[in-house]
Amino acid sequence: MAQPGHNRQPVGFSLRLQLSPESRLGPGKVALLEAIEATGSISAAGRAMTMSYRRAWLLVDDLNRMFREPLVAAAPGGAKGGGAHLTPMGRAIVGHYRALESKAIKAAMLHIDALQEAMAEAAAS
């Protein structure tokens, strides 16, 4: 019999906030914002996340309408390229979400550990 705490697999944890009945912010939208910041492009961010350009644009539009200021500023493409970047509000929203996520994980670890210790041996391996 393995000792408690040994052979533990990392626990998946995701935080999805329902900010209003029709407005949700979760790991996918935040990852898209981070990918836009990293790539400088909505289409490149979508490709990096294996989503269509249309899906990425619809999510960006949703995010820009969700808050009082846009989170993503985009320049039209063309011969010179266009591009996109996060606005100061976009960077702030990502920062708040990641800080909240980190605090939630830390607060939950005691209970996650207890749940993992209570798991059957077959489920733990």
Image (cartoon, grey):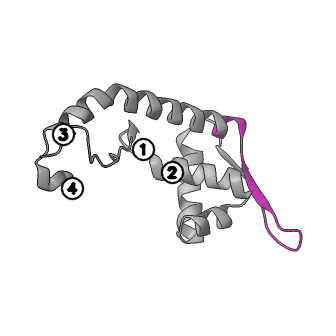
Relative horizontal placement of residue 84, taking residue 100 as reference (left or right): right
The secondary element bearing badge 3 is classed as loop
Mark 4 belongs to which amino acid?
A: Ser
Judged by depth in the image, the label closer to the viewer, 4 or 2, is: 4
Any magenta on residue 76?
yes
Give the CA distance from mark 1 to mark 4.
35 Å
Of labels 3 and 4, earlier in sequence is: 3
The residue to which callout 2 is attached is 29
Of labels 4 and 2, earlier in sequence is: 2
Image spot of residue 26 (x, y percent): 44, 45
Q: Which mark is residue 125?
A: 4
The secondary element bearing badge 4 is classed as loop
Which stretch appears magenta? 75-90
Above/below status of 92 relative to 34: above
Q: Name which quarter of the figure residue 105 lies in.
A: top left
Contact (Cβ within 8 Å) of mark 1 with mark 2: yes
Of labels 1 and 2, earlier in sequence is: 1
Q: Residues within 10 Å of mark 3 (few under 14, many from 20)?
A: few
Above/below status of 102 relative to 51: above
Mark 1 belongs to which amino acid?
A: Arg
The residue to which callout 3 is attached is 3
Contact (Cβ within 8 Å) of mark 1 with mark 4: no
The residue lying toward the viewer, choosing from 93 and 50, is 50
Image spot of residue 89 (x, y percent): 66, 35
The secondary element bearing badge 2 is classed as helix
The residue to which callout 1 is attached is 24
Judged by depth in the image, the label closer to the viewer, 1 or 2, is: 2
